[in-house]
Image (cartoon, rainbow, N blue to C red):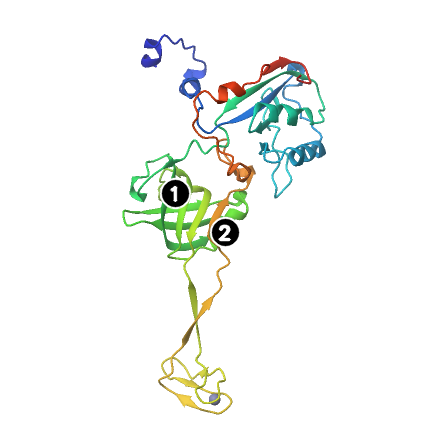
Amino acid sequence: LKLFADAGGEVEGFHGGRGIIGAIAAIGETLEADHTYELLAYRKPENWGKPRSLNPASVKKMAEATKHETFGNLDPETGRVLVTPRGPDPVYFGVRGETPAAVLKAAKMLELGEPVERWAVFRSNQGTDAHLKTVKAVSQVPAYSCVTVEGHVSHAPRRFPGGHVIFKVEDGTGTLACATYEPTGDLTKIAAELVVGDRVRIYGGLRKAEPVLEATLNLEKLEVLEAVRTFRKVNPLCPKCGRRMKSMGAGKGFRCPKCRHRSVKAEKASVETERKLKPDLYLAAPRAHRHLTKPEERYGLEKTVMPGVYLKLRPKVFWGYGWPPP
Ligand SMILES: [Zn+2]
């Protein structure tokens, strides 16, 4: 804060100064690299705290019509509308997208159930994975940090009551426990398919160790870089007639049920089993995303560093009273 004051900044703190650091960080982040836009529409004060109505069918229609231009509108698994917040805050809805023009076009397609007091388009780091720092070694993951790190699965996934799955990843410098919870949707099922030896890149936030639980990374994304081959043991085939032999008990060899051939020396054979899990990037369901998590729709749309270029894309009018926007 001293640094901020020395630079000529003025700070007014409420509730013990909560949010000041975040607000200063927001001013300092010029968003020249990857960024997105959000149009926020605000409610009239008399509607604050009341349930929000917004035609869900119009959200679906808008999402389809603006595919690759907007993101995070609906949860694809449940169909739940994600553009309206749940809490008592004055925001009616927010539409996130790639350009100011896209969020303006999309917002105007929504069928509203109440008047809009005012609206504004913000440039933001939402949906850019800005919170994730790449860490070189598992042992270097700092407490409370959000990271992406590579390693091998060292402990097979275990399912726990309540639906969460925990597995461990190591890279020679250390071991890290990773957890996925039910709200992440298919990510939990994907994690359960991991086997020891799979090479993975994990994305998520580290939770502090608790008395009964070691420090655990809450998984947001899982990239399977390499799925190892898996095998299962089967009884050998009969060398005389080719029929599958039967075990005569541990260490006692095998017997053919057809031609009665016996062999003490015969050993179980290995057969490769099919892995359902293929190398790919797997994301948590959007309803479990943080604001900053880059959603599936945004992959390939990342904006690269071109200082100044994006300022030219700034719309002439980026906020106003009432509805609709121009
Ligand atoms: Zn036989």
Residue 239 pos. (x, y %): 43, 87
Residue 108 pos. (x, y %): 68, 24
The label nearer to you, 2 versus 1, is 2
The residue sitting at 71% across, 32% down in the picture is: 58
Residue tagged by mark 1?
A: 216
Q: Nearer the viewer, residue 82 or 301?
A: 301
Quarter of the picture containing the N terminus is: top left
Residue 299 pos. (x, y %): 51, 38
In the rendered image, the vertical position of residue 37 relative to residue 143, given as above or below: above
The residue sitting at 43% across, 54% down in the picture is: 157
Left or right, 192 with reference to 155: right
Residue 94 pos. (x, y %): 60, 25
Residue tagged by mark 2?
A: 190
Left or right, 27 with reference to 36: left
Cα separation, mark 2 vs mark 1, equals 18 Å
Whether tag 2 and tag 1 are in contact, CB under 8 A, the answer is no
The amino acid on which the numbered mark 2 sits, given as a three-letter code, is Ile
The residue sitting at 41% across, 44% down in the picture is: 202
Query: Residue 152, which numbered label?
Result: none
Quarter of the picture containing the C terminus is: top right
The amino acid on which the numbered mark 1 sits, given as a three-letter code, is Thr
Q: Nearer the viewer, residue 298 or 93?
A: 298
Residue 198: quadrant of the picture:
bottom left
In the rendered image, the vertical position of residue 318 relative to residue 63, given as above or below: above
Q: Nearer the viewer, residue 208 or 276?
A: 276
Q: Secondary structure at mark 1?
A: strand
Number of marks in the rendered image: 2
